[in-house]
Image (spheres, rainbow, N blue to C red):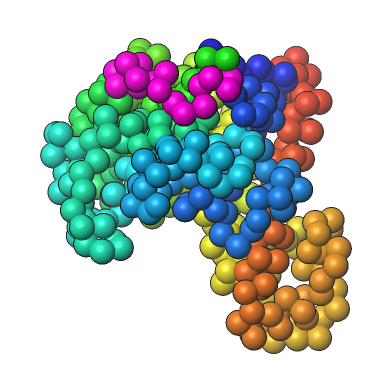
Amino acid sequence: MSLRLKILAESGSGGRRGELELPHRTVQTPVFMPVGTAGTVKAVPQETLEALGAEIILGNTYHLYLRPGHEAIRRMGGLHRFMSWPRALLTDSGGFQVFSLSALRKVTDEGVRFRSHLDGSSHCFTPEHSVDVQLALGADIAMAFDECTEYPADRARAEESLRLTMAWARRSLDYFRAHGDEVVWREEFEGRTQSLFGIVQGGMYGDLRRQCAEQLVEMDFDGYAIGGLSVGEPRELTLEMIAEVLPLLPKDKPRYVMGVGYPDEIEQYARLGVDMMDCVLPTRAARHGLLFTSEGRVNIKSKRYAEDQGPADPACECMVCRRYSRAYLRHLMQAGEALSGTLNTIHNLAYYLGIMERVRRELSGSSPAAADENH
């Protein structure tokens, strides 16, 4: 067994409260997953992530492949042991990062040849190689290699991207089924293995999205992600594509929307039935002085906070808001202190994780019958 999803409650809008049992952790869903690109959620120690309640975080296959190298991580017992993270991990396929290197890559049916952004060296990712790298990293959840469609893209481009994604999904799954027992920690967990998720692509064309979802479901992945969103399209279109796909995905398997979003977006998607989400926004914004609060977004660099002795968010109970003032957080930004990024990031992650905790609590009191009565 790789994973098991237990649905505890559902709402009339499709939202669901569940438990996702993975080898390293049983994760409460819906869940927001902080992004730890290079084996670290930037500026935040692992023990702080644990204190914040993060149960699953992401690692980035492309970056870890280039540095320190997946074979080195394999020799050190996998990414969990390497970064001293005992809870659940998910790794992406590297497809999105390769997609973002548009000037440095060449896509063929075989895979993607690209040049490293670090030193210009030449590399090739195929579906088989992506899965092999992820087996070496040893996350609880790995992703099939996909071809991400940019926005805007005409229909011919979206159809070609979908063709590649479907072919690569099959190759990823075949390789995973042949080699999945090679994950580094298998013996520690009584023969349990990683899980592999397929990724729904299709650009901003609803019929292509539906076609992709139906074919992936036939392949019988362990879970399903909706990718190729938050690439510049209007939010309304993002929501439309999610709504096209969700009803087609199995109710007994996890549903993951990749790379989203702002706080109100992740809450909205969770209430529609999305189980898992990730985004670099809370950590990236924090390093630029943007804090998410119950009172809206706060640009802590603003002069108006120079002598503000209140917390970043009066409604927040995180370790930052309990101790530090807006004036101090602004001072750290102005002084270029490294602590600035750490404290801002801790607050933003606490805010995002808190949203999901609240949604889970509210969904726990829901049932389809109760929701129907309310309507």
Q: Where is residue 231 shown, x and y percent of the image?
A: 38, 51
| Residue 57 included in the magenta stretch of the image | no
Left or right position of 230 against 323 = left
Left or right position of 136 against 155 = right
Q: Where is residue 269 shown, x and y percent of the image?
A: 58, 38
Q: Is residue 158 visible?
A: no
Residue sitting farthest toward the front: 75
Left or right position of 307 against 145 = right
Q: Which residue occupies the foreground of this view, 18 or 50?
A: 50
Q: Where is residue 144 shown, x and y percent of the image?
A: 35, 30
Q: Residue at x 66, y 17 (%)?
A: 6
Q: Is residue 338 above or below residue 93?
A: below
Query: Which quarter of the rendering shows the C terminus?
Result: top right
Q: Residue at x 47, y 33 (%)?
A: 138
Q: Residue at x 67, y 18 (%)?
A: 7
Q: Where is residue 306 shown, x and y percent of the image?
A: 75, 86
Q: Residue at x 59, y 31 (%)?
A: 275
Count of labels shown? 0
Tell me where residue 41 sits by quadrant: bottom right
Q: Which residue occupies the foreground of this view, 70 or 26?
A: 70
Q: Which residue occupies the foreground of this view, 234 or 136?
A: 136
Q: Is residue 129 visible?
A: yes
Q: Is residue 152 above or below residue 338?
A: above
Secondary structure mostly taken by the magenta-highlighted segment of the chain: helix
Magenta range is 173-189
Q: Which residue occupies the foreground of this view, 96 or 50?
A: 50
Tell me where residue 173 sits by quadrant: top left
